[in-house]
Each structure stands twice: as structure tokens, then as C-alpha cells.
Image (cartoon, rainbow, N blue to C red):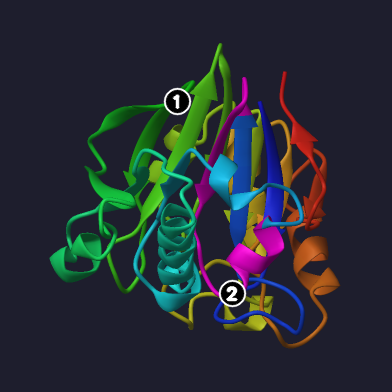
Amino acid sequence: MKITPIGIWGGYPKANSATSSFLIEHDGFHCLIDCGSGVLSSLQNYLSLEKLDAVVISHYHADHIADVGSLQFSRIINFYLGNHARPLPIYGHTKDQENFEKLSYKDQTVGIAISEDDVVQIGPFNVTFCRTVHPVYCLAMKFSVGGHSIVLTADTEWRDELIDFASEANLLISEANLYEKHVGKAPGHMGGSEAGRLAQLAGARQLVLTHLPLHGNIEEILEAAVQNYNGPVEIAKVGKVYGIS
């Protein structure tokens, strides 16, 4: 099992980059986690779009779905060129029915409902979910294969339930959108110190920080995480392959 950051920013991407998104792969199966602004362009540095096998959407804020329409257009263009393929499954929750319905498009993509209580088999992955604390309904995700797991918090404030959800994860990918002076004052997000504390309490073996702010010095967020977690921690690096075995 391996996972590659496609983008690391929250809200909107910096120039020539993308919002927070990850490509997770195992046994030749390729799954994209979130598909926000700039993601489709960045993804093509690592995978041809027609090789994508599934997409999982944590929630329907624009920085997590902005490029879904472009992905759908890529499928229909390939169809017109004679490259017929099965519909691409896009997994998303139904708490926002209008946006969920948009995941299905002209038999090229099909929306598949997920919820916090589900256990879903997506290719080789056993995937479970945990509701987060965010202004809209949002799901953290755990991808498991053969006793190994990767947990992604998606967008969230601190929530005690995430400790058990991320327990003993081989890799915890946590949002860290806030500088310490903003922790507890900005809804729906965590700071580096909280990401570090979550990894420490969960016993995660490695911590990677994502969904980062576009202002300030993000090394301060890394330092806050380091002060609260005894394991290896780094800021997600686009294109770096994190292998789990």
C-alpha cells in the first residue's frame, strides 16, 4: 500500500499547485482521495486519468470537489474518442443530496453513497469512516489492507472519537490548517499541536500534515506538531511516495 500527496493546501491552491488530495494505491488499484482545485492537473504527473479506479470525497466544500467536473469531462471526451470504459465510482455522503447527485454524470461516473457507519470495500481496500467536526458533514477515512492502515482526518476540529479511529495507524495524515494563535478560534480545523497530540494519543507510527494555510510560515505548524508527538512527522510533500508494508 502506498499513498502520494497530490496537493497540500486548504481553501485554494498556491500557484502551480493543488488543494489537499492524495492518491492511494495497492495491487494495481488507484484511488483518489478528494478532488479539489488543481488536483486534476497535479494528478497527471503521477497517473494517467484513464487509469483511475475510484474517487472518495470527504465533503462538498469547493477545495475538495472543484475538479470533479473536469474529471467527468475527461471521461466523456475519452468516450467520444472511442475509449469506452466502465463508469468511474465516486464515493460521497448523501447529507448534501444536491452535490451527491452531481457525482453521477452521463454514465461516465457514478455516485456511491457512504456514511460514518459504513464499511466499504473499494478495490483491495477495506474503508471505514468517522464523522468529523466541520461546518458541513465531513468524513475522516481509514484505508486498511492486510493489517496495515492509513488514516486521513479530512477537515476537522479536535474530536476525541478520532483517537480510537486512528488507533495504531501506520500512517496518520492529519489536517493542520491553523497556527497556534488561531486554535479554538476558527471553526472546523486543527492546529499542528492538535495533529501531533492526536497522533501521540492514537499511537500512530508516522504523522504527515496537510490542508495547510496559504499565509505565514508553515514550518511553525510542523514545530507545533513535533512538540506534541514523539514519532516521525513531516509536512506532506507533493509527489513523495509514502509506502506502508
Q: Position of residue 9 (x, y in %)?
A: 65, 72
The residue under the point 36% across, 62% down is 59
Is residue 205 depicted above or below 18 in this figure? above
Residue 167, x across and y down, in percent: 52, 30
Please state which amino acid type lies under the numbered disc 2: Gly
Closer to the chain start, of discs 2 and 1, is 2
Q: Which residue is mark 2?
A: 10
Image quarter hosting the N terminus: top right
Q: Which residue is the extreme one toward the bottom? A: 215
Which residue matches tag 1? 123
Residue 19 sits inside the magenta stretch: no
Q: Is residue 34 magenta?
A: yes
- Residue 152 shows up from this direction: no
Q: Secondary structure at mark 2?
A: loop
Q: Quadrant of the C terminus?
A: top right
| Identity of the residue drawn at 66% across and 28% down | 170
Q: Secondary structure at mark 1?
A: loop
Spatial separation of the CA atoms under disc 2 and disc 1: 28 Å
Residue 128 in which image quadrant: top left
Q: Which residues are magenta?
A: 26-43
> In front of the other: label 2 or label 1?
1
In this rendering, position of residue 133 left or right of residue 153: left
